[in-house]
Image (spheres, helix red, strand yellow):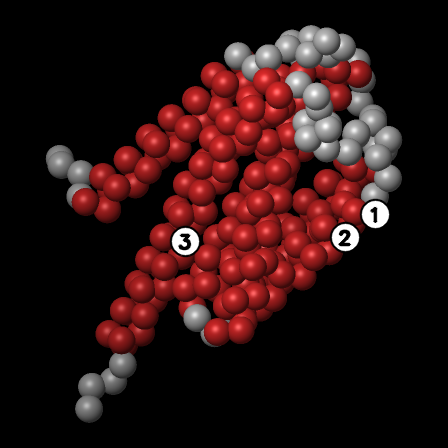
Amino acid sequence: MKATPPARGRLTSALWFLGTLAAIAALTAMGPQEKSLGSNVRVVYLHGVWVWTSLAAFVAAGISGALGLATNRAGLHRWSCALGRTGLIFWISYLPISIWAMQTNWNGLFLAEPRFRLAVIFSVSGLLLQAGVTLLEHPAWTSAGNLFYIIALLIALRTTQNVMHPPAPILNSDAARIQLFFGLLLAFTLLAAGQVARWLYTRDRSGQNISAARQTVRLPQR
């Protein structure tokens, strides 16, 4: 049986996404070593790009939501929803990477570390937010929620104390080779996030089109 055009498109998107993940894994495995952490620094690279990607998605969701609230354009609300959920996916999945980085570089888990506690708190609150706006089924509330979430997160990151987590270690590094590698790895991770956001946006738009079609069919004939 031949695949229908929508099914073929979903398969192609899935293959591209898997290819992007494979490229991220390969790049991480080939990352430059560091004097004090050695090859274990590669986990730190992955941890870093995952956090930055989630923050970029949250910021994009907030901006899209603010524009959607200002212009009342449905497409901007849908993008805010898709980007907010994408950011949350990367934010939650960064937690096990963070634990991995702690275990490999500091030989133990420091779960009371302020930045890690912040990550857990905003993971739970993000899940509750997305569940709430999904139940409300009102695009404007989704945009407003995403805008409030990223503002609160940025304030919390600004005011949370660094203990084991140095502030922007890659940006403050003197090794241009490490910075260039981190930028390349970040570009691939942002690409993966873009693929996830586009899939979520397309799925949401398709679902709304189907709902609208069903409502049209159910309208009484006059």
Mark sitting on residue 155: 2
130 is higher (above) or lower (below) than 96: below
Quadrant of the image occupied by residue 63: bottom right
Q: Provide the residue designation for mark 3.
A: 201
- What count of labels does the image hold? 3
Is 97 left, or right, of 24 in this rendering? right
Q: Are marks 2 and 1 in contact (CB under 8 Å)?
A: yes
Mark 2 vs mark 3, foreground winner is 2
Question: Of the residues under marks 2 and 3, which one precedes in the sequence?
Answer: 2
Quadrant of the rendering where the C terminus is positioned: bottom left
**Pointer 1 residue:** 159
Residue 97 seen in the current view: no
Residue at the spot 41% in from the left edge and 41% down from the top edge:
195
Question: Residue 15: x and y, percent?
Answer: 33, 30
Would you place residue 218 above or below residue 20 in this image?
A: below
Query: Mark 1: which amino acid?
Result: Thr
Q: Nearer the viewer, mark 1 or mark 3?
A: 1
Name the kind of residue labelled 2 in the image. Ile
Mark-to-mark CA distance, 1 and 3: 33 Å
Q: Are marks 1 and 3 in contact (CB under 8 Å)?
A: no
| Residue at the limit of the structure toward the left, as seen here | 1
Q: Residue lying furthest bottom in this view?
A: 222
